[in-house]
Structure formats: structure tokens, C-alpha cells
Amino acid sequence: EVQLVESGGGLVKPGGSLRLSCAASGFAFGSFSMNWVRQAPGKGLEWVSTITSRSTYIYYADSVKGRFTISRDNPKNSLFLHMNSLRAEDTAVYYCARTAGVGQGMDVWGQGTTVTVSS
Amino acid sequence: QSVLTQPPSASGTPGQRVSISCSGSSSNIGSNPVNWYQHLPGTAPKLLIYSNNQRSSGVPDRFSGAKSGASASLAISGLQSEDEADYYCATWADSLNGWVFGGGTKLTVL
């Protein structure tokens, strides 16, 4: 079964750090670009970051650039999001998602992990 | 404010056809394929339509997508109660070097 499972969310104080993980199974992880997408309470989906299959290209939303770092470990079928200098507005459910192919959208999503930034 | 503009809400009765619009610009929808997602609160978003008008695996043919210029639309025919959800359009934005989502449309089945 094709599956993505996020972990690492929790409660953190403003200015703190957190590392999210996404474990992939059931497909050739190293062949796909991967993404992080978040949804703040009462808000819509917001793209956070994308990393290509071999980490050649990495992209970030302006709202997280310089604070978040995306990375992956293909042999371990894992995706990561290192989050520093966290702000209240980073509070959200964070989803990892697979890009199906060029122009094909994100076809596999995890259930999400919740990050709450509050003092 | 989202780069892609969607109506915040839409509604219809069972069996009806509803359409949800998504407006962008030449640097996003105008130059890249559009994808549509269905999202129920507390669950993982689901890819419905990719590459403007291609249904994702397992998606019934009641769902269809179209694109013209810098705008796109999602149509749902034969509306069912289970279609009640939030719907998002998305595409790659060349000027931002990233994905952009619409603000989402909450579909209510009356």
C-alpha cells in the first residue's frame, strides 16, 4: 500500500525549533519529488516547500524561506522539515505529499501532523 | 490573500450540477497545468483532477475539469451528499518558483 506517515508535531514556544518527519512506503520514494503543505486553523491549504527526487532542486514559500529547511534520505524513504524561529502563524497541520509527475499534482498525502506555536 | 481566486462557497441540491471557478494569471494558470483537490476536515486532501482535465484514479466521471487562458473550473454533476467538502485549485507559479493554491471553496449539498 502506498503510504505517507508524518510525525514530529507538537507544542513549541515562539522562537523554538521542531523537526517533522515523513515516512514513505509502498513506492519508489527516490523517484518522486516531495512536498510539505500546511493548513492553519480555519484557513486553506498553503504550500510550504518542495524537494526534487535527488535533492537537486529545493523551493520554499516566502513565508518560511530562511527559517525552514526541507531534506530527504532516499535510502531510508524519509522526508524531513526542519523548522526554526517558529512563529504563532506557523501553527498548522503539516502534510507531506508526493508529486505524481510533471504537471500531475500531488497524488499521495499523509494524514498530517499538528504543530502548535504558543507560549 | 491567495494568488488563485476561488469563490468561498458554493451549494447545490442532490442531482444538480455545480461549477467552481479558479482565476489566476499568465504566470501561473496561464502557463501551467491546473490540479483540483477535495479536502474533508481531519482527513488527507485528495487529488481529483490533474493536468487541467484528467481524473485521478478512482475519481468518478461526475467530476470534470477545464481550463481556458488564466482561468480554470471544476464541475460536479449529479451532486451527492458525500461531495460536501472543501475544494482547492492549485498550479505551479513560475514567478514564485512554487505551488500556489486557491483559497478554497466550501461546497454545501442542501
Image: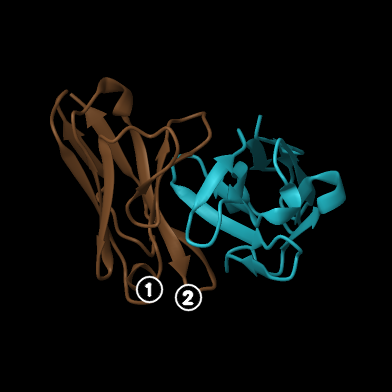
Q: Which residue is drawn at 30% across and 38% down?
A: B106
Q: Residues within 10 Å of mark 2 (few under 14, many from 20)?
A: some
Can residue A39 be seen in the rendering of this structure?
A: no
Q: Given the image, what chain letter belongs to the residue carrying mark 1?
A: B
Residue A31, x across and y down, in percent: 70, 55
Tell me the residue that label 2 is attached to. B94
Colour brown maps to chain: B
How many dots with numbers? 2
What is the quadrant of the N terminus of chain A in the image? top right
What is the quadrant of the C terminus of chain A in the image? top right
Q: Is A29 above or below relative to B24? A: above
Residue B21, x across and y down, in percent: 23, 53
**Horizontal relation, residue B103 to residue A10: left or right:** left
Mark 2 and mark 1 residues within 8 Å of each other at the beta carbon: yes
Residue B33 position by quadrant: bottom left
Instruction: Name which of mark 2 and mark 1 comes first in the sequence.
Output: 1
Residue A108, x across and y down, in percent: 57, 41
Q: Residue at x 54, y 73 (%)?
A: B97
Can residue B97 be seen in the rendering of this structure?
A: yes
Determine whether the residue tagged by mark 2 lies in a helix, strand or loop.
loop
Q: Which residue is drawn at 43% across and 47% down?
A: A44
Amino acid, disc 1: Ser
Colour cyan maps to chain: A
Tell me the residue that label 1 is attached to. B31
Determine whether the residue tagged by mark 1 lies in a helix, strand or loop.
helix
Q: Given the image, what chain letter belongs to the residue carrying mark 2?
A: B
Amino acid, disc 2: Asp
Q: Is A77 above or below relative to B97? A: above
Display coloring: by chain
* Residue sitting nearer the eye, A114 or B109: B109
